[in-house]
Amino acid sequence: MVIADIFHRIHLVEKWGTGIGKIKSLEPNVKFETFAGFFSTTFKRKDDMKNASVNASVNASVKLSDLQNKILKEIEKDDNSTYDNLTKILEKDRSTIMRNISKLKELGLLKRVGSDKGGYWELVER
């Protein structure tokens, strides 16, 4: 807050609270998130948006195993699920869970946001 106040005093900030509106008007696909007291802004690359429809059609045709579907359902219930938690719930070996999560990440259906300890899982639309 101190830095923002200094920038405002030396006229490097035009108005308080106008930045997010400007960003949204210029980049409608921007994603704003807050987690653990931090603020994050994610911009999609133009190439990523072109490939998004291609990835969606590829993901739609991918057959998932029973276990992979169960993993996605558990993560949908609790995006803070851990490997150990999933191991207990699904009664599978930790390496099996890790291997299937890696496959889901490769397929673009699941991604990890943040650190291993403080992060969470994000399901990518199918």
Image: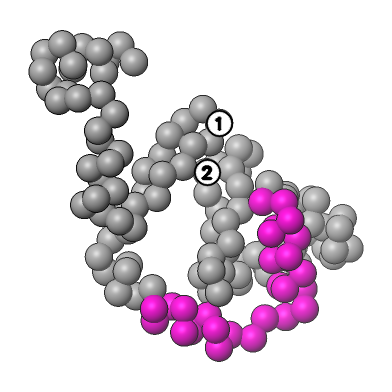
Q: Position of residue 13 (x, y in %)?
A: 17, 23
Foreground label between 1 and 2: 1
Q: Position of residue 60 (x, y in %)?
A: 55, 84
Q: Is residue 31 visible?
A: yes
Say which residue label 1 marks. 36
**59 up-or-down from 23: above or below:** below
Disc 1 versus disc 2: distance between alpha carbons?
10 Å
- Tell me the residue at 39%/81% (across/down): 54
Q: Secondary structure at mark 1?
A: loop
Q: Which mark is residue 92?
A: none
**What span is colored magenta in the figure?**
53-79
- Is 86 positioned to the left or the right of 43 in the image? right
Q: Position of residue 12 (x, y in %)?
A: 12, 22
Q: Which mark is residue 114?
A: 2
Verify CB contact (< 8 Å) between mark 1 and mark 2. yes
- Is 26 positioned to the left or the right of 12 in the image? right
- Tell me the residue at 79%/50% (across/down): 84
Q: Position of residue 107 (x, y in %)?
A: 53, 74
